[in-house]
Image (spheres, coloured by chain):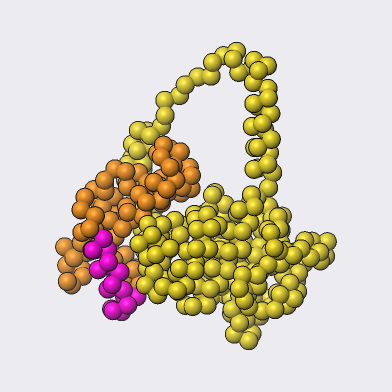
Chain colours: A yellow, B orange
Amino acid sequence: MDCREYREIISAHVDGQLSVGEASETESHVNQCPKCARMFAWETRSTKILKQSLSPRPVGYELKQNILEQLRPAETPWPPLLFLHPAWAPALLVVFIFASFFYSGWPFRSQQDLFAHTAGYYQRVHEGASELLPPTDTYLTARILDLTPWGYVLFGKDIQRVEGVENRVFAYQGLQNELLVARELDGKTLSPPHGSTVVKKLEKDFVIAASGDINLVAWQDGSMVCVIASKLPSDRLLALAAEIARQG
Amino acid sequence: MNWDKVDQQYESVIAQEGRTEKDDPELFFEAQHLGSDVESALTELPEEFRTAIVLVDIEELTYEEAAKIMDCPVGTVRSRLSRGRRILQVMLKDYALERGIKKK
């Protein structure tokens, strides 16, 4: 990937909408290219400003409605009895099997995304190129993954909706100044990605993975997937995850 | 739309980051004054870019959902969004300059 190609997909990168392959290609380019890293930091913050400026505007509602009205496809009714014809049965079965496969959990690709993106967050915070914002009091009340009881100090946060899922990221500083990034996604189901290890603790499955020297531990907490990332040794990170999960 | 000009201007917007105290787009665009500027800029944006921005940035749809509504590939949504946001940034910089909020 070169800078020109990166520029074409920078918005998708900022929105976290790249595929696994693209995300990893992009991360390696951005890590080696200070200009693109700076552009990413700029785009992340300016996109946030644009979104904030756009979202609460009542005038925009009319504009939105006009556009949505123009885009809405004309509805075509189903042919009445054709749908019930027995010849449709095999086709419907195939559709059902595919649908079950895709909606039974979280597709494999997204699991890879989860770990790669969380490691990406860690890396950017580590390099000071973070897009995280300072925490606010109102925001703290929404936090489930709270590491402050273990001596970690919260200094950055972010909230996004990815594919309709609430995605919250927090950056903490530990007692030995170590950095720790915690992430929670509401409404997702965790399944171990390829290359990860699953450890059972307190009757709960913890998925352990690594991205370079960044260790990651993920677990399911009700309808929420929790992930923590750090350069701490994986056994220490796992112990911390188990403590947090136990408290939760 | 002259893309080369937009790209050049965008480059100049990015280039100013770090040279001033404004290592922050919020200060650069004078975000507290954005208000109606964003609305005006959005209205002036060519339709295909405006649609992508409305669906993704305001309606908070995913690229896939936006692509279905726009009846185009996801890649097209990506490039329209990328272009659209870039044009908006250039327009907002121009507005700030016109108002004299920022010095040239």
Position of A141 with respect to A209 (left or right) is left
Percent x, y for residue A139?
54, 64
Q: Which residues are magenta?
A: B7-23
Percent x, y for residue A74?
42, 25
Task: Give the residue at x 38% y 59%.
Answer: A5
Position of A117 with respect to A133 (left or right) is right
Is-magenta flag for residue B47?
no
The answer to whether residue B65 shows anywhere in this view is yes
Asked which quadrant contains residue B83, the reply is bottom left
Is-magenta flag for residue B21?
yes
Position of A182 with respect to A3 (left or right) is right
Q: Single out the residue that lies furthest toward the bottom.
A: A176
Asked which quadrant contains residue A115, the reply is bottom right
Determine whether B36 is above or below A65 in the image: below
Task: Give the residue at x 18% y 72%.
Answer: B103
How many discs mark residues in the rendered view?
Answer: 0
Position of A75 with respect to A229 (left or right) is left
Percent x, y for residue A79?
54, 15
Percent x, y for residue A56?
39, 52
The answer to whether residue B58 shows anywhere in this view is no
Task: Give the residue at x 68% y 22%.
Answer: A89
